[in-house]
Image (cartoon, rainbow, N blue to C red):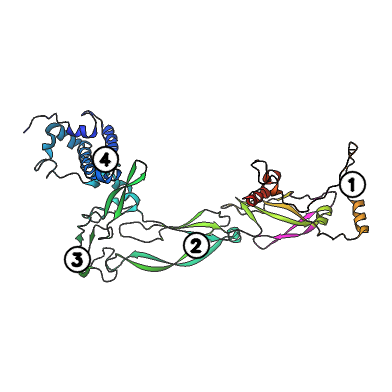
Amino acid sequence: MASGSDDSELYNVLGVSNSASKSEIKKAYHKAALQHHPDKVAESDRADAEIKFKNVSQAYEILSDDDKRAAYDQYGMAAFEKGGMGGGGAGPDMEDILNQMFGGMGGMGGMGGMPGGRGGRGQGRPQKGENEEQEYEVTLEELYKGKSTRFASTKAVICSTCTGSGGKEKAKPKSCDTCKGKGFFTKLVQVGPGMVSPTQVACSTCSGQGEFYREKDRCKKCKGARTVQQKKMLELYIPPGTREGEKIVLKGEADQQPGQEPGDIVFHIVETPHDTFDRAGADLAAELDITLAEALTGLNRVVLTHLDGRGIQVRVDSHGKILKPDQVLKVSGEGMPVKKSSDKGDLYLKVKIDFPEDGYFHDEATVAKLRELLPKPEEPSQPPPAEVDEVRYELDADLAQFGGGSDDPRAGAEWEDEEDGQQAQCAQQ
């Protein structure tokens, strides 16, 4: 037997000293693997890159393992020749390399939920199956009052005849030669400039199981699929006050797979737009449409129908109180319900005054009465200029045209409120 070896070839491959720590070896390997990966070089250099990548991978496979590194430090590569520790001198397995490089893929749920094979190979299988996720549109009325609905769901369940094995009683499965019983292949996928990530692809031969039954040995009920389709009635309950984007989860109602806990059906709530109300959290907002007479003299009437069908009556006495455009009335406790509480948000009513149509005051006598009743213009603090021009005007002009065609940032929307400003900007585009 050879004495202690000073063979440093593998250390040189990774560009580290023979006293390098595990973390230094891993970092060096990561760098070298990216540098020499066949997919990262020109096609003309691919053959050479494959050899270098294999050497880098082999060096890491040995130096990252304490026992193999100790044997290499003492005996060199002779320790891994036929009859030695490595057995057969074969290069390291890509799956083992990636497992070590990325911290053990089997412990990561198979990287993306790919299952492992049967017979003890299922460590890569996630403990829980995939969730079934979908959007569910709900009206604001339904979110205010709550909603309960029943629906039919068809899901995969474990075959009761073969209890999920896929084969007849006493039949033995055949190990898949394509994936060597693993149920998947591992490959590096580029995820960014100079960055790769391992991913697993299910084996199509065995459908990701690592083994399969010959046609004559398959279960007659599930035809070897291990699951069958079953229809079930489910109930979906949406509590009052539920918000846009919340999730309603039906636990364990997604498809079943042998060896897994069933996933959930997850509904993502989508709130459909409402003709009257806008919502923010537990608060509601709506326009309060009133006439000019009501703005000046008060009102006492039902101004809108709430989400539960109730009429909302607003009373504003005329004791000198005048409602102005865009003024906001806050009605406490008339907003949306607050989940798991008896509280409610508030209702905000924004005053919108409907002015009479042109020609409504058609006679001079009526106009004279209005002038008498309404406030008169304030007297100017200074006498008017000596020269005065009476100008012509264009009625109902579009302020979005203000500064149009210029690059002045003050054009258009700066002269309007936020809502009208957005319309002006759209008009300019």
**Comes first in the chain, label 4 or label 2:** 4
Of tags 3 and 4, the one toward the viewer is 4
* Label 2 residue SS: strand
Is 357 on the left or on the right of 246, as rendered?
A: right
* Label 1 residue SS: loop
Disc 1 to disc 3: CB gap under 8 Å: no
Disc 4 to disc 2: CB gap under 8 Å: no
Question: Residue 109, which numbered label?
Answer: none
* Label 3 residue SS: loop
- Amino acid type of the residue that numbered disc 2 sits on in the rendered structure: Leu
Is residue 409 rendered magenta in the image?
Answer: no
Q: Could you classify mark 1 by the number of other residues whose Cα lies within 10 Å: few (under 14), some (14-19), or many (20 or more)? A: few
**Comes first in the chain, label 1 or label 3:** 3
Tell me if residue 96 comes above or below residue 334 in the rendering: above
The residue that label 3 is drawn on is: 171
Question: Residue 236, which numbered label?
Answer: 2
Q: Say if residue 317 shows up in the picture.
A: no
Give the spatial CA distance, label 3 vs label 2. Answer: 42 Å
Where is residue 226 drawn, in percent x and y? 29, 64
- Amino acid type of the residue that numbered disc 3 sits on in the rendered structure: Ala
Give the spatial CA distance, label 1 vs label 2. Answer: 63 Å
The residue that label 4 is drawn on is: 36
Where is residue 329 drawn, in percent x and y? 73, 50
Provide the residue span drawn in magenta.
300-326
- Amino acid type of the residue that numbered disc 1 sits on in the rendered structure: Lys
The residue that label 1 is drawn on is: 376
Give the spatial CA distance, label 3 vs label 4. Answer: 46 Å
Most extreme residue toward the left is: 1
Q: Residue at x 24, y 43 (%)?
A: 45
**Comes first in the chain, label 3 or label 4:** 4
Disc 3 to disc 4: CB gap under 8 Å: no
